[in-house]
Image (tube, rainbow, N blue to C red):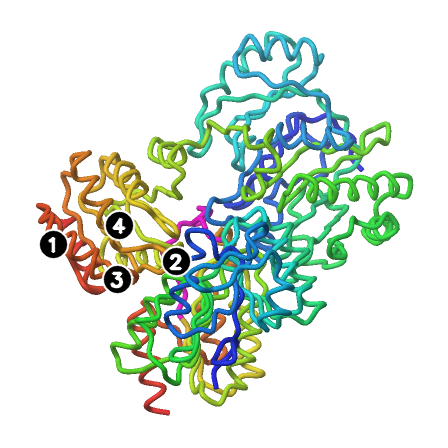
Amino acid sequence: MSIIVDESTKLVVSGLTGREGSFHGLRNRDYGTDVVAGVTPGKGGQDVDGIPVFDTIKEAVDERGANTSMIFVPARFAAAAIDEAIDAGVETVIAITEGIPVHDMLKTYWKAREAGVRLIGPNCPGVLSPGKANVGIIPAQFFERGKIGVVSKSGTLTYQIGNELKQAGEGNSTIVGIGGDPIVGSDFIDILKLFEQDPETELIVMVGEIGGDAEERAAEFIAEHISKPVVAYIAGFTAPPGKQMGHAGAIISGSSGTAQAKKEALEAKGVRVGTSPTETAQIAVEVLRGG
Amino acid sequence: MVLEIRGIVRAQHYAKRGPAAPPQPIRAAPAGTVRRRGRSLDSLRAALAPGARRQETMDLLEYQGKQLFAKHGIAVPSGRHADTVEGAVEAAREIGFPCVIKAQVPIGKRGKAGGIKLAKDEAEARTHAEAILGMDIRGFTVYDLWIEGASEIAAEYYASVVLDRGEKKLLAMLSRMGGMDVEEIAEQDPTAMVKRHLEPGKPLDAELAREIAREARIADDVVDAVAETLVKLADVAVAEDATLIEVNPLIVTADRRVVALDAKVTIDNNALFRHPELAELRDRSSEDPQEAMAKEKGLTYVKLGGNIGILGNGAGLCMSTLDVVAQAGGKPANFLDAGGGSKADAIVDALEVITSDPNVTAILFNIFGGITRCDEIAKGIIEASQRIEIKVPLVVRLDGTNQEEGLRLLAEANLPNLHQEKTMLGAARRVVELANA
């Protein structure tokens, strides 16, 4: 097992004909992901290195059995592409695109919720289940198959921690980048629930950052609903108050939303919090082996 | 309610950061009335944190916000913009006396800093404009003034529409305790701040707005006008792609009109392609030389004042890098997120910005490539070293996509003063050592 993506994933890539879309779409296929189609309006009938391209996601679902959509289209069209994927009947939409207007995402978030479609992102690195499927831009070579589930707001920080785990000899069930935008389709709690139910996952690493209150909410949820050990890392201890650090919600004012406040909220619920990515990986390994 | 003519000493709505500002009525309130000038809903806002994405959000200056309100039919005092003393005097003459001369900077405590003054006549208008223009208010230089008629205030309310990222809905808030330390009041008396979420994708329902106003115990005769204003504020949020619209105070004038006496508007920069007129707005007051340069080059840069220049890719990794450098005993000079998919040119730009800060004594590149390719980063470093003179040591840690190629390019280039490190912690320790050498 693993969560969200695995051997049964049949991926349609919106924006496969674009530069980044083709680079990463083909990398995903090379990794072993079943990339069944690409979608670019007006380019139906073409192919990208053998992957058929359709004008609409619906055609990709009907003709190729796509069940998962990856969004790689420019920001101003991305919410519409997610909406299209929801309407086309896929189970999961993974939106990599960054820079989608937040008011667009407000509407799209609720559309996905109402349709019962799992939306990951936007502005996220995607989801990787090592040895099974990679959907997105996560460099898979830094992750091994294993027992640790990772859920993270930050892409690069996720790679960093995954790499540290690998060096310590541990691997991952699934790595989920939920994205750092103000409105993301799935938050920590949504993913924690999935990891809790996943038999392959024995420990969960949660990577947060300053801003918002998703970590504080997750702390409450963990205390009540998660039986597996959770280890956390929070970035932004040295971020100066009031400075925008350029990520969603990464604005601090007062004490709420600070790295310290998040750390304390998590520790109050028994979650150990590392002070660096390295220490976080060390704690995870220690807990996994000790418990 | 105390009736007083007062300059609008409302520093606090820009006060995302500071503690409460003391009361600063220009004409003192009658004895026995205490007027506290506090910060607005700082911690609530932080919890909701309508966010800056990679390219951050844009806080409009008060007058820009008011012009936006006026465009959407929300009553604001008539006012004029000026950026010279003569312009301010002329504006004051046109507005009539008494009027208020207000420094336009995106920061709180403007009044306390002397940036908001009541002018009774032309001579006073001139004196105040001369004093305020060019003034430094908590690191922001005053280039812009807003001159508006002083308002007769019968009541002060608080109104806002903010993106609640936790609930994924817009949240309308209203209190009859505006102007004061609403946050503290809301904490002590939860009924003092009425909050209602908007239905996703729908405007604020007029009947719901009236319900909010009644529940907030707004004076009966202005319930409709306040409700209507709240509906319009929600419309502004959606129409203008704002993540925060805050009016504190929303006043009732002596003749019972409802007027927005201040405006705090935060625009989602990701939506600026839909708002060319907003995209053109500039706030010159806040520009540090490096930050201005970075903005021009489209980089996400925040100056932090230390001596170790930092470049990372991804906001999370950048923040983590700052933390790790601080743990190693170093002082970061800046935060610079090269972003996803950085090309060589972006790296050259980033190095130009970082090295233009005279305090920088060493630079750390911490890259873990996903969408970013390490070979592009390496090419950028090599190109930068040819185009600009980098006098300080550069510690580079490259991991991720196309890492081998990147490392090979750097090794071949054999740049002087470039130090490669394999791990983030090792790189942090090395750069601290070199910076302090």
Q: Disc 4 marks which residue?
A: B377
Q: Is residue B274 left or right of residue B295?
A: right
Q: Disc 3 marks which residue?
A: B399
Question: Could you confirm whether marks 3 and 2 are on the same chain?
Answer: no
Relative image position of residue A61 (x, y in whole percent)? 62, 69
Q: Quadrant of residue B196?
A: bottom right
Q: Amino acid at mark 1?
A: Ala
Residue B8 vertical placement versus A136 (above, below): above
C-alpha separation, residue under disc 3 versus residue under disc 1: 15 Å
Relative image position of residue A280 (x, y in whole percent)? 34, 73
**Marked residue nearer the N-terminal end (3 or 1):** 3
Kind of element beneath mark 1: helix
Q: Quadrant of residue B3?
A: top right
Cβ atoms under marks 1 and 2 closer than 8 Å: no
Question: Could you confirm whether marks 4 and 3 are on the same chain?
Answer: yes
C-alpha separation, residue under disc 4 versus residue under disc 2: 17 Å
C-alpha separation, residue under disc 1 versus residue under disc 4: 13 Å
C-alpha separation, residue under disc 3 versus residue under disc 2: 18 Å
- Near mark 3 (Cα within 10 A), the count class, few <14, some 14-19 or many ≥20, is many
Q: Is residue A225 left or right of residue B347?
A: right
Name the main secondary structure of what is drawn in magenta.
loop
Cβ atoms under marks 4 and 2 closer than 8 Å: no
- Near mark 1 (Cα within 10 A), the count class, few <14, some 14-19 or many ≥20, is few
Q: Residue at x 68, y 67 (%)?
A: A113
**Marked residue nearer the N-terminal end (1 or 4):** 4
Q: Amino acid at mark 4?
A: Ile
Q: Disc 2 marks which residue?
A: A23
Q: Is residue A115 left or right of residue A64?
A: right
Magenta residue span = A233-247
C-alpha separation, residue under disc 4 versus residue under disc 3: 11 Å
Q: Which mark is residue B411?
A: 1
